[in-house]
Amino acid sequence: MPSHYPIDATRTDLAREFMANPMGPHGAALQRIVTRMRDTESAGRYVLVTSVPYQEWVLGTLSAKRGTDVTLIEDQVFSSIEDAERAVFKLRWEAITGEPLLLD
Amino acid sequence: MLEKKIAGYSDQVSVAPGEHLRFMVSCEPGVDRYQADIVRLISGDRQPNGPGYIDEVLPTSASGEYPGRPQETYIGSYAIVPHSPAFDDLNDLSLQACIFPTLPLLRRACLISKLDGERGAGFALWTDPDQGLVLSLGDGAGGVREFALGRPLVSREWYLVSASFDATTGEVRLAQELLDSYALNASSGEAQYTNGGDVALVSDAPLLIAAASREVARGRPVGELIFNGRIERPVIASRVLERGEVESLRGGPIPRPLRSDICAAWDFSRSIDTDTIVDISPNRADGELINLPIRAVRGSAWTGEELNFKNRPDHYAAIHFLDDSLYDSEWETDFELDIPEDTPSGLYAARLRAGDQEDHIYFVVRPPRGRATANLALLIPTASYQAYSNMRGTIEAGMELASDRLAVINPDDRYLNRHPEYGNSMYDFHNDGTGVCYSSRLRPVINIRPTHPWLWQLSADMHLLEWLEAQELPFDVITDEDLHAEGFGLLERYSAVMTGSHPEYYSTEMWDAVHAYIQDGGRLMYMGGNGFYWRVAYRDDKPGAMEMRRTEDGSRSWASEPGEYYMAFTGEYGGLWWRAGRTPQSLVGNGFIAQGFDHSSYFRRTESSHDPRAAFIFDGIDDEIIGDFGLIGNGAAGLELDWASRIYGTPPHALIVATSEKHTDAYIRVNEDIGHMLLSIGGQDDPRIHADVVFFETPNGGAVFSTGSIGWISSLFHNDHDNNVSRLTRNVLDRFLDPQAFE
């Protein structure tokens, strides 16, 4: 059962903390948000699909169904895991809070 | 985007010089030919800062180019009963069984079949998503008549189902009775058809339980429309049985007045440790189980008063059939290998290459049987490799929360997901939600590969192999399978034995052998974490298959049903070794306490490390901090951690020479060490969440060294092996190889 921890959309300071160090370890307040984002239903969960081993990844979503492939989001290609984490954080922030994450 | 298209397996995992190996390979379209070579594996980790992949080709007659072809795997469990004259004289017919469907709404599934649809002869009993029980009877004219009960079955409930055909009156009767009692029950019922029409009951079709078949492959009928769930005491009778007679046949011996009317009555509580199903009728139409359905499971008579199937087999008279279980892929051989007599012991692979395609089918060349060719043995944990084989968790669930980072799906994961027929790991669920308690190595295994990007088991153990090769010390390689088969005699030839990074699964025979070795002056280097944790069993007549039950507690993805804690293969109590009275700490000083998969940490030396008994361990090491670097999570203390505990049996004289610290909250205490559920079970709060490096002497001049962490060996490569983890490990190894007794 996925997490139901609420994310306060005004806490862009925590989003900035994530962007500065997406691989953690995170402070306690940010970790709560990150855990909330990672604890989703398996079906539709964002994953990174290796396109070039150790070099390039394409964003995808899980089918969570045996025998059914991941769905690729072809225009979301990353050459670093860190950048992928940042991009998914933004997507999830908006999906959960209903507000886009706007950082200057 | 790279797409994996080639995979294979071998018929053996450990062979001695002069012995023979067969390799089976399947290629998807686009791979018409591949090059195969036998290589000695030296290093596997291809991550940018890792040692890379290194091998040495072993010149053999197996090297060459081979045609690629797809190979078929037939998955799912059922029983086949050879032809018996008892089925040739059927005029009237009754069929019955107790059933516990687990996916009754998925599709039509077969309970019993002896049906030739093309000729319109024979019979079959089915469950149908809409109709519930369905009886099919051949019409003698190339067709099949169907008679449906008309009420859907509910999943995970026991039913007594029966069907009959009266040749004199043409009457067909069906009944399904829910055995539990509910205030509202729409799924029990009966149906009666007054005129079944022309019927031909006798056919040459094979008799199957839990499946139907229209096709023969590998010399036997292929099971189709396999029933998911439990079947108990199927019966075939040559006359119409009345309600009371049906009830009397549910269990126990066949009542005397019915004996001449019963063609077959299979008692699944017999021969539970075999593939045989025993017919207790005078006809003795015994059958054979295919693809390891689960035995020693609760039947309809189970009450909970007895938890051990050996004491009340009648409570365990069911078999759990599954449409996705697998024992042996039985692919055709693509190439073979005679291990040259002078081949040094080591970890080898058949390396397959075709353009951007690659696979490594690993195997071990052990020393010639009956002797050692080095003082040191590396014990490859093939039982643990087998438990993790074809783990589907990454692509089916993502492991994001466990590792606190986005899951990475590799071409291997997608390939495995395209091939459900390659079977599951012991961490997965069957299609019906049942936990996987059997695993076989006689099938293509995708993740136990030297270059697999998820550094776990073999791919992680390559760090140790790479380091050992660099030490320029001779060593033999042996496996869990060798240890299980040969016991202490295999180990006693060695001055020192090293384990892999995660020797988690142990049979009784393996445990006893390691214990005897330690007690007899042997020196054991336990080079990882969470070892000696789950108890497993093998069956002599089922090579390559392994059983495990996830009982009581433990870090686990599923749990065995109550009353199903004893293993069918051996009758032994399964689950955690701790719950069977043997703690890992009592064997190796250390036992599992926490796991986490984000950042690894480091060890700090303890006061005890300055004990003169430990001086050899730290020879030339002035650092207080050990292993603040590594290829997995950047530290030697990572993934799964062990702690020393007097309460759990760490020997009183053991020295804890280093302890890890500063683990993240992604590291959480194991559930068997959680009593009440409190907030402070993460690494930042709980001081128990750490790894210990432990040393202790054993009787007769032996000793044990435990690293306490799966991540330890990932630190060995750092700075071209010039680091304190490498130095410390070498110090211990040198002393352990020194014949001078520990005192």
Image: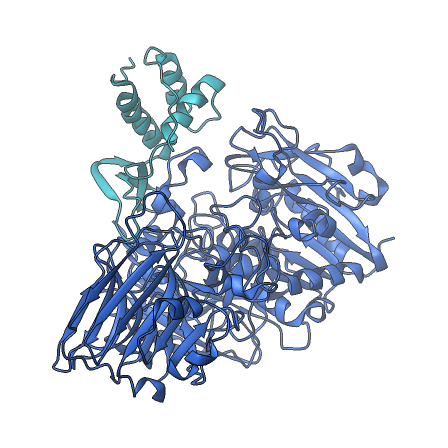
Chain colours: A cyan, B blue
**How many numbered dots are placed on residues in this image?**
0
Q: Locate residue B532, reporting x and y percent.
A: 63, 53
**Which residue appears farthest toward the top when viewing the image?**
A10
Q: Nearer the viewer, residue B23 or B151?
A: B151
**Which residue appears farthest toward the right when viewing the image?**
B743
Q: Locate residue B192, reporting x and y percent.
A: 21, 65
Locate residue B130 relative to residue B439 in the image: left or right.
left
Q: Locate residue B407, reporting x and y percent.
A: 37, 39
Among the 4 quarters of the image, the one containing residue A77: top left
Locate residue B705 relative to residue B106 in the image: left or right.
right
Q: Is residue B177 above or below residue B369?
A: above
Q: Locate residue B114, reporting x and y percent.
A: 28, 77
Among the 4 quarters of the image, the one containing residue B172: bottom left
Q: Nearer the viewer, residue B95 or B381?
A: B95
Q: Is residue A73 above or below residue B185?
A: above
Q: Nearer the viewer, residue B53 or B639?
A: B639
Name the residue at 61% across, 56% down: B468
Q: Nearer the viewer, residue B117 or B469?
A: B117
Locate residue B734 relative to residue B394 in the image: left or right.
right
Q: Is residue B455 above or below residue A4?
A: below
Name the residue at 32% across, 81% down: B238
Does residue B648 show up?
yes
Does residue B409 show up?
no
